[in-house]
Amino acid sequence: MKLVFFSLTGQTRRFINKLELPANHAHEINPNNPFHEINEEYILIVPTYDAEVTEVVNDFIEYKTNQKNMLGVVGGGNRNFADLFIFTAKDIARDYQVPLLFSFEFNGTLEDVKNFKKVVDNLESKKS
Ligand SMILES: Cc1cc2nc3c(=O)[nH]c(=O)nc-3n(C[C@H](O)[C@H](O)[C@H](O)COP(=O)(O)O)c2cc1C
């Protein structure tokens, strides 16, 4: 299973780096060319911004088999935005009918890293 993420200012990328994944287990969506087919099941991790900013994430999801292979979505955000906390991930969960698996603020705490790993392990054990 892969992790696919988008990061505008580097917080989400930092979270992914903290997971210390084996090589090639993560794919960063390229805002200049999001059209990349993953070809295997993956979890999407997205920060929260206005729809114009995250449109490239939708472009990625809708490319070839990517929508079919998306197992769930994780939201990164900032709780100061209150009701708007992780709305991008929530919108993706609703629009593409996938579960919202986890949320964290900024680049995540060590506790977030630990808890997110449990979510991934859990999902992997259900698959095997
Ligand atoms: C212009 C702007 C708007 C944002 N709007 C929201 C928001 O509505 N809800 C939220 O939870 N976080 C919001 N955030 C916080 C970011 O999603 C958060 O800092 C995230 O960790 C950034 O990830 P990135 O550095 O990988 O792009 C906003 C940040 C900026 C700069």
Image: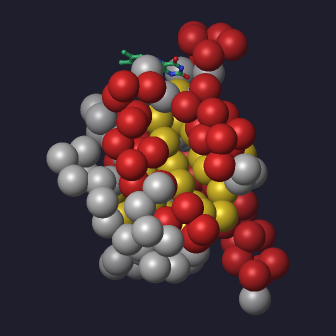
Q: Is residue 45 left or right of residue 31?
A: right
Residue 97's place in the image compared with 49, above or below, is below
Ligand 1 shows up in which quadrant of the image?
top left
Q: Is residue 102 visible?
A: no
For the residue pair 57 and 45, the one nearer the viewer reads as 57
Task: Point out residue 122 in the picture as x, y percentages from the top left corner.
Answer: 77, 70
Q: What residue do we see at 35% from left, 42% from top?
A: 56
Task: Point out residue 2 in the picture as x, y percentages from the top left corner.
Answer: 49, 71
Q: What residue do we see at 29% from left, 54% from top?
A: 34
Q: What residue do we see at 62% from left, 16% from top?
A: 84
Quadrant location of the C terminus in the rendered image? bottom right
Residue 31's place in the image compared with 117, above or below, is above
Single out the residue that lies furthest toward the bottom: 128
Q: Is residue 67 visible?
A: yes
| Residue 4 figure quarter | bottom left
Single out the residue that lies furthest toward the left: 32
Residue 86's place in the image compared with 101, above or below, is above
Quadrant location of the N terminus in the rendered image? bottom right
| Residue 75 figure quarter | top right
Q: What residue do we see at 46% from left, 35% from top?
A: 47
Count how many numbered circles sit on residues in the image.
0
For the residue pair 40 and 59, the one nearer the viewer reads as 59
Task: Point out residue 30 in the picture as x, y percentages from the top left corner.
Answer: 25, 52
| Residue 36 figure quarter | bottom left
Colour pattern: secondary structure
Task: Point out residue 12 in the picture as x, y percentages from the top left corner.
Answer: 41, 43
